[in-house]
Amino acid sequence: MDKFNFKLQKVLEFKESYEEKKKEEFSIELRNYYEQEKRLKELTEERKKAINNPPKFKMILDYQGFYRYLDLLEKRIERQTQALNQAKERLERARQELIKATKDRSIIEKLKEKAYEEFLEEQSKKEQRLNDDYALYSYLRGERR
């Protein structure tokens, strides 16, 4: 019996490795997104605690310092929100690239499956022809006697 040889095997291997690379990139972007989200939650919690439990002030400078601190927290929260949005965009881009890579690999795999089915069908036909030849040969040998 002949051995199955898929003509696009190298392309399939390339597509598989490319998909793995895109999975890793997606995983990195997902981790980054969760880190950015965690930082934003921490900053928001810090601001909430500061507002709900303000320190006791003895001087007007203490008030000013506290409000500067709150203003600084607001700016950090804004920057962190922007960083989170950027991370979300990169994550979505990585997701789309992964989906495309998966589809590309899937197409090649389907071609391989179809080629393998055709190969099996051809092998079955060859085997059937061989069996028919043996049967005919046996019949002819039997008639000669």
Image (cartoon, rainbow, N blue to C red):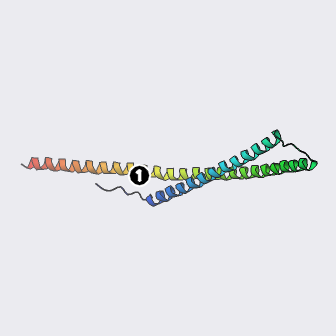
Name the secondary structure under disc 1: helix
Instruction: Where is residue 97? Give x, y as percent.
Output: 60, 53
* Left or right: 114, with 143 as reference point: right
Q: Residue at x 56, y 53 (%)?
A: 23
Quarter holding the N terminus is bottom left
Asked if residue 22 lies left or right of residue 88, the reply is left
List x then y, in percent, for residue 34. Answer: 65, 48
The residue sitting at 89% across, 48% down in the picture is 62
Q: Tell which residue pokes out farthest to the front in this image.
A: 58
> Residue 99: x percent and y percent?
58, 49
- For disc 1, the marked residue is 115
Check the image and name the residue furthest to the top: 52
- Tell me where residue 14 appears, x and y as whole percent: 49, 59
Say what amino acid the circle numbered 1 marks. Ala
Between 77 and 55, the residue placed more toward the observer is: 55
Q: Which residue is drawn at 80% across and 49% down?
A: 73
